[in-house]
Image (cartoon, rainbow, N blue to C red):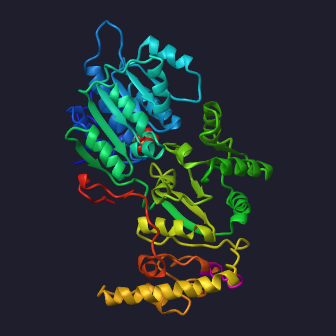
Amino acid sequence: MSQTFESLGLAAELVRAVTEEGYTEPTPVQAESIPYILAGRDVLAGAQTGTGKTAGFTLPMLQLLSAQSIQGGRRAVRALVLTPTRELAAQVEESIRIYGRHLALRSTMIFGGVGMQPQVDALRRGVDIVVATPGRLLDHLGQKTIDLSRVEILVLDEADRMLDMGFIHDIRKVLAVLPRKRQNLLFSATFSDEIRTLAGRLLDNPAQVQVAPRNAESALVAQRIHPVDSSRKRALLAHLVGTGDWRQVLVFTRTKHGANRLAEQLCKDGIEAAAIHGNKSQGARTRALASFKAGELRVLVATDLAARGLDIEQLPHVVNYELPNVPEQYVHRIGRTGRAGVSGEAISFVATEEMDFLSDIEKLMRRALPREVVPGFEPSPAPQAVQAPRQAQLQRRQQVQHAQHRGGGERRQPGRGDAARHSPHPKSTQPRSATTADRGTPAREQQPRSNANAQFPSSGAVDRKYAKPDRPRRGGRGKVPALLGGTLRR
Ligand code: AMP
């Protein structure tokens, strides 16, 4: 029998609030973490945006705080939620207000990019819960405008992202001013060695919760790759928005500058677009997001950090204008669509020079993603003069590796890798025939004019094992810690 919010032990006021939100049953991360948190346990949770994790820690936190509300006396900050970005802070605080609407608790948010004084005023009036980004919180601590000596519950939300953003020192400084006895909740989408170290120091005998990324391999998200030259990406985007009559598309770029430039160019092309990233003022980011949600902007161009935690209901299209260099970020990006039972599509524009990134992503997804060349946007063939010597070098290396592998007694896996290995030009001169990834995709994928797909081999594990040595990956990212049982349920 599926669980209900009541059966998890939540109070009537909270059940009423979630029912008013239209939630009929808890998500897996809620069902698993809420009872632990209500029981006062520390929790280490592997869950990303889209899984319902915010309610997973907010609901029990509100219940614990309201169960012992301070009678009379001044309010004190009793719960602190740290988040990596202002957007996430704003969304978490909004959730606290929504879920806590039938309770008498007060919350506020603290982040940079806006004036200190309104935050100082809110803190002076008294709050029970503070949602903060680490840098600005330290400013308040330095100016003694916040007192964290009575914190009972600490939440680190998207802890991996906070460490990626270099917040570890700030986090340590904050931890140093908190009471030693408190409940700690750590939520992270991925588990690097740094996260494990932090969790080891911070958490006391934590209950462990691991849920599958809701959208990672959701059948609701149709994914495809459009091979295209970098210089043609903007025209391809305008083409797809126009021909597909796309009304709402979230586009990811890797840099803030790239996001700005693309948004400006799209506006010149007559497509309403805006960019959000860390250099934009909070006001500009909030306005852009509101216009996008209201359907006034067709394209929102975002960097990974700015888009972190964005929750846009029924977002139909996500475009990776540039592939992320950290494969897990791809999963986060495509998770912006295909939510709440509504299907969506995630399209990636991939230039030849991004092939390594694509290989890493496919390795993480454990499958090849279908390629589809859009007619009129065929990528140019790789320059032969440069390619030929490298090709020969690569082939020699493959032959050596191949011999080593076989000599080492490794079991040979039959499959499509065989064709690639036995081909005289395994990588770039063989027109691609249907692969697992292509089956069912139209014949227009084969582009004899430029032999376009030949540069975009499917990168199934077998092919790649022999095709190129893997690039070193950053310290264990994406691995599920032994702490969590070592396997990621999918
Ligand atoms: P989060 O992972 O916290 O970013 O939540 C993702 C989305 O799921 C938000 O729009 C929430 O409003 C929604 N949500 C959270 N819990 C539930 C639930 N039990 N049922 C349906 N939607 C939910």
Residue at 44% of width from left, 33% of height from top? 92
Q: Quadrant of residue 286?
A: top right
Q: Residue at x 44, y 85 (%)?
A: 417
Residue 17 visible to an observer of this rendering: no
Q: Position of residue 285 (x, y in %)?
A: 62, 36
Q: Would you identify the image quadrant in which residue 134 lies?
A: top left
Closer-to-camera residue (277/406)? 406
Q: With respect to residue 240, does 458 lie above or below?
A: below
Q: What's drawn in magenta, residue-wise?
A: 446-454
- The answer to which quarter of the image holds residue 470 is bottom left
- Figure check: 459 above or below 201: below
Question: In the image, 359: left or right of 189?
Answer: right
- Residue drawn at point x = 37 percent, y = 37 percent: 156
Task: Look at the image and tell me whether residue 281 can be seen.
Answer: yes
- In the depicted structure, whether residue 179 falls above or below residue 307: above
In terms of image quarters, where does ligand 1 lie? top left
Q: Main secondary structure of the magenta part?
A: loop
Relative depth, front residue between 470 and 264: 470
**Residue 36's spot in the image, x, y percent?**
22, 38
Q: Nearer the viewer, residue 338 or 446?
A: 446
Is residue 74 within the magenta segment? Answer: no
Residue located farthest toward the top when viewing the structure as drawn: 72
